[in-house]
Image (tube, rainbow, N blue to C red):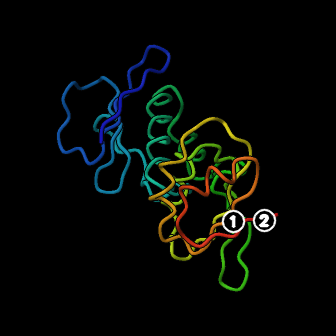
């Protein structure tokens, strides 16, 4: 996986599992042996990142690439190790009788919903989704909803979403 981002005219290259670097000094951020590196400097173990999912880890690497070496590594490590994400985005709400409740109500597109579903075992997931229609295709949800224990669909777009949901569904009135 490789991503290039432009931050304040500084190019940042994010490379996963890099063994050899080309173009020293160009802002390479990568993971090797479970550590985040900037060029060849080992910065921190990636297990300090509290956010779940590869997409979040890549976002952290992009932020590191944009700020290091302009911000002290100690401040970056402190931020990375304490940042729990934004409200309503894959946020653990409560654990009750062995069930973990996750709020990801900010997932306002099928792509975000699919990404969030990828963080949890589907066969144990009860998905509540719906809301206003943004004119997006819900077709990508067809495969994503396969295997979900139960989905509860509501809102203006519930009929459109239901077309792509062939699994157990409960539609509230």
Depth check, front residue: 114 or 77: 114
Residue 101 in which image quadrant? bottom right
- Which residue is drawn at the image coordinates 42% and 18% (left, top)? 10
In the rendered image of this protein, does residue 119 appear above or below residue 139? below
Quick check: marks 2 and 1 in contact, CB under 8 Å?
A: yes
Q: Is residue 66 left or right of residue 173?
A: left
Count of numbered circles in the view: 2
Spot occupied by residue 52 in the image (x, y as percentages of width and height): 52, 57
Q: Secondary structure at mark 1?
A: strand
Spot occupied by residue 168 in the image (x, y as percentages of width and height): 59, 73
Spot occupied by residue 167 in the image (x, y as percentages of width and height): 54, 70
Tell me the mark number nearer the camera, choosing from 2 and 1. 2
Q: Which residue is mark 1?
A: 152
Residue 149 in which image quadrant? bottom right
Using a 10 Å C-alpha cutoff, classify the residue at mark 2 as few (fewer than 14 neighbours), some (14 to 19) or many (20 or more). few
The mark nearer the N terminus, 2 or 1, is 1
- Which residue is drawn at the image coordinates 19% and 45% (left, top)? 19
Q: Is residue 89 left or right of residue 11?
A: right
Depth check, front residue: 142 or 123: 142
Q: Secondary structure at mark 2?
A: loop
Q: Residue furthest top?
A: 9
Could you give the CA–CA distance between mark 2 and mark 1, rounded to whole angstroms? Answer: 7 Å
The image quadrant where one finds the C terminus is bottom right
Q: Which residue is mark 2?
A: 172
Q: Residue furthest right?
A: 173
Depth check, front residue: 163 or 96: 163
């Amino acid at each position: 996986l490789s991503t290039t981002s432009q931050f304040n005219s500084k190019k940042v290259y994010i490379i996963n599992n890099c063994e050899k670097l080309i173009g020293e000094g160009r802002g390479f951020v990568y993971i090797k042996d479970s550590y985040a590196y900037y060029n060849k400097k080992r910065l921190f173990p990636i297990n300090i990142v509290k956010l779940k999912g590869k997409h979040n880890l890549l976002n952290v690497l992009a932020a590191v690439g944009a700020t290091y070496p302009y911000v002290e590594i100690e401040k970056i490590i402190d931020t990375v190790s304490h940042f729990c994400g934004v409200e309503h985005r894959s946020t653990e709400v409560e654990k009750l009788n062995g069930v973990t409740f996750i709020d990801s109500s900010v997932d306002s597109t099928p792509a975000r919903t699919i990404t969030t579903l990828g963080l949890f075992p589907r066969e144990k997931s009860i998905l509540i989704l719906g809301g206003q229609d943004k004119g997006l295709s819900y077709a990508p949800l067809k495969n994503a909803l396969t295997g979900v224990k139960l989905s509860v669909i509501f809102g203006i777009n519930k009929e459109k979403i239901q077309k792509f949901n062939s699994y157990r569904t409960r539609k509230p009135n």
